[in-house]
Image (spheres, grey):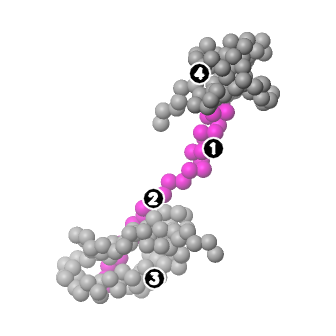
Amino acid sequence: MATPRININAQIRAPELRVIGADGQNLGVLETKEALAQAKALGLDLIEVSPAATPPVAKIMDYGKFQYEQQKKEREVRAKSHTTETKSIQVTVTEGEHDLTRKARNAAEWLREGHRVKVELQLRGRYKYMDPKFLQERLDRFVKLIPEEYKVAEAPQRGPRGIATTLEKSTKKS
């Protein structure tokens, strides 16, 4: 991810800037030369913080401190971001009740964590040719065992290995 280039001091090309002082107060719209002179008098830098605004916004502060604050903000954003994975559970037609409940508990835990869960009813050998309604009922029976609130993200689809559906955490507010 490329960070936008930040103009400081003589790199600023705008004729006028809205300047924010070192103490955070708004100094108003000044000419760039005048703002640079004020920054130099304080022994600080003039940093263009919002080049897209009209007029661009610049701040008088130490450039090292500005870089540190930017990095700190980026770290906070990265820490708060949560990547969702698609977890997978495979179920067979002949799976026992205890195994199904254990797998359903695992799926519920993953849904609570915010992950998507792909449930696959694996069909091997002669099970591939069984009645589609029966197979759909088997998949539904497992999905109903999941104790967590969920919504179906992808409807059940027949694939080369069997029938699969994807579930997501429900966004309902109770």
Q: Nearer the viewer, residue 98 or 35?
A: 35
Tell me the CA gap for discs 3 and 1: 38 Å
x 50%, y 54%: residue:
83
84 falls in the magenta region: yes
Q: Nearer the viewer, residue 29 or 41?
A: 29
Instruction: Return the x and y of residue 51 as percentages of the image width and height.
Output: 59, 28
| SS under mark 2 | loop
For the C terminus, give its image quadrant.
Answer: bottom right
Residue at the spot of label 4: 7
Residue at the spot of label 2: 85
Tell me the CA gap for discs 2 and 3: 22 Å
From the image, state whether disc 4 or disc 1 is nearer to you.
4
Amino acid type, label 4: Asn
Q: Which mark is residue 144?
A: 3
Instruction: Return the x and y of residue 30 as percentages of the image width and height.
Output: 72, 19
Q: In the rendered image, which quarter is residue 23 located in?
A: top right
Instruction: Determine whether, in the image, residue 53 is placed left or right of residue 110.
Output: right
Q: Which mark is residue 33?
A: none
Mark closer to the chain start, 4 or 2: 4
x 61%, y 31%: residue:
53
Mark closer to the chain start, 2 or 1: 1
Q: Which residues are magenta?
A: 68-94
Could you tell me if the residues under marks 4 and 1 are in contact, i.e. CB atoms within 8 Å?
no
Instruction: Determine whether, in the image, residue 128 is placed left or right of residue 29.
Output: left
From the image, state whether disc 4 or disc 2 is nearer to you.
4
Amino acid type, label 1: Glu
**Residue 20 seen anywhere in this rendered image of the structure:** yes
